[in-house]
Image (cartoon, coloured by chain):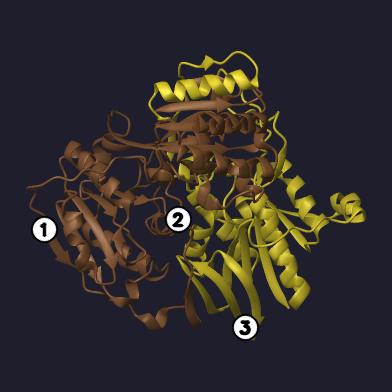
Chain colours: A brown, B yellow
Amino acid sequence: MARVDNKFKDYKDVWVFTEIQDHERVLEGALELLTKGREIADTLKVKLYAVVFALEAEQYLSVIERHAPDAIFYCSDKALKHYDSQIFPELYTRLIQKYKPSIVLFPSTEAGADLAPRLAQRFSTGLTSHCTDLSILDSHEHGRGILVMKRPAYSGNAIATVICPRTRPQMATVQQGVFEKKETTGRKTEIRNIPFEFDLSKLRISSLEAPVRWDKPKVPLEQASIVVAGGRGLETKRNFDRLYELSEILGGEVGATRVPVFNNWCGEERMIGQTGKTIHPRLYLAFGVSGQIQHTASVVDSEIIVSINTNKSAPITELSDYVITEDAGTFLLCLIEHLKREKRT
Amino acid sequence: MLSIIVCIKQVPDTQKALFDPKTGIIGRNCADNIMNPDDLHAIEMALSIKDMYGAKITTITMGPPQAVDVLNEAYALGVDNCVLISDPRFAGSDSLITSKVLSRAITRLGPFDIIITGCEAIDGNTAHVGFQLSEFLTIPLLTQIHNFQINSGHAIIERLYGHEYQKIQVRLPLLLAISKNTNRVRIPRLYELKTCTDRKIHMMTMDDIGGSDQEYGTAGSPTVVVDTEIFSHKREREVFAGDCSEKADMLIHKLKKHNILKY
């Protein structure tokens, strides 16, 4: 154990990849990670760093400061307007080599999911993706202040606890919506500018035409207070489409498990689960959802869970407040009818 | 002629897998093992490049001996060569070590113009391997491809990147990670299905790719799974009685009680 501690004594702080979304705002998931990172840094009695690469990065510093990092490293350049899989890893690698963080956290976004595995390879270290919980553990076997990461596993009903005991930094990507963000005041944040140094002639990918902006339809599932979701048990797109009618009556949003997305009943932006979104509405209505863990881990914080399923021993029933054993499509139709009648009277 | 390598993986069919309700662990033996869905699309990508420009396609997989099944399936679809990288010393490798094994095997088998993988496997859902292969082999990785052409040693690619459609040019060699949205998988001919198991599978072990025991498998993997617990968020589970219509009324009543329905 002494050897382990000694080997890593230079590796101390906690870093958060503070991603800028659509070059106009700090990603919510990054602010959530800063809040969680603050807690971890306090437990370890080390510093929390926010690392920001962006076009005109200065504009984001005040928002980031309110989420209580001890320091912000920022780098500003027009080449940093979008995430770039050649430039970002290179700049990050240099910073990590120089400052040796013990823990580096990333939101599970397109950019985070590209940057994190690349850095893990460069430092021959471990990465745990799509984590749903992070904590700190002192272990006799593995040393003090180990990052403990939890993620869904076995595509079934288990949560794996993963550590990275022999290498540094310890790295994790975290689903958006898993932690809560919190603003604090009164912390003195050190702000340090990192000069942009990258030989752009090294880039192997060159642009042939000016890119065309394409906006993904934004579905505010994470903020919705009512989510009606469909799964395999709805059986047809026709049935799935009725969810939109129900969500309109209730004033909610439509979500889906993996099967409807696979079958093109709806777009990927509606997917709830390990590779989709994490939600915490007041009401979650699950139509024909069996309850695979990649999905359920992302809905457990819902206040009320109602499941409609023909199989009364489907895993989803275990975490339901109300269980309705019916064919999902039939019940959906029936419920819409009753709600309409209710509204008229 | 272009040389293409496709990395595929055998996975338990998680849609059909059976779980032991006590341990919550997937029964690897009772679930069918299938080719990872994204990897079928990766093979399709290779085949369509072959149809357009002519190419020799080599498919590789790392796994236990029974992973040979997915290689036979790849033969049936029309690839030219198959390699099984199998060694008990690789058992327990995490995503980083898997990428290391694949990259070393690819270097031994090479040179290649295009390497294709699926975006992510349905059993682990890490989506690390494409990015880490890109780092090990120091060649660019491209994802979310809509259109792909080759012109004098360069690939002309249309892709979605962040929230932009881009048309870009990349010098070969390069890596592509393919998802189900990229193409539609062809159906193998019956004759190919019947004869695919007669084709030769090239075998590779640690002795072929080099390195030492300590670098691979559980010993070499930086991540350690210390615990797997059954996931439990059990709730009240009030089961509604009656017919469909009564249950709908019951639900509406409950939603009113919780102040979710306000009329």
Residue A218's mark?
2
Number of other residues with Cα within 10 Å of mark 3, as a class: few under 14, some 14 to 19, many 20 or more: few
Residue A326's mark?
none
Look at mark 3 in the image and give the residue it sits on: B153
Q: Quadrant of the C terminus of chain B?
A: top left
Q: Are marks 3 and 1 on the same chain?
A: no
Look at mark 1 in the image and give the residue it sits on: A190
Looking at numbered disc 1 in the image, what kind of residue is underneath it?
A: Glu
Looking at numbered disc 2 in the image, what kind of residue is underneath it?
A: Lys
Cα separation between marks 1 and 2: 35 Å
Cα separation between marks 3 and 1: 49 Å
Q: Are marks 3 and 1 in contact (CB under 8 Å)?
A: no
Q: Nearer the viewer, residue A229 or A16?
A: A229
Side (left or right) of A195 relative to B145:
left
Question: Which chain is mark 1 on?
Answer: A
Q: Nearer the viewer, residue B122 or B251?
A: B251
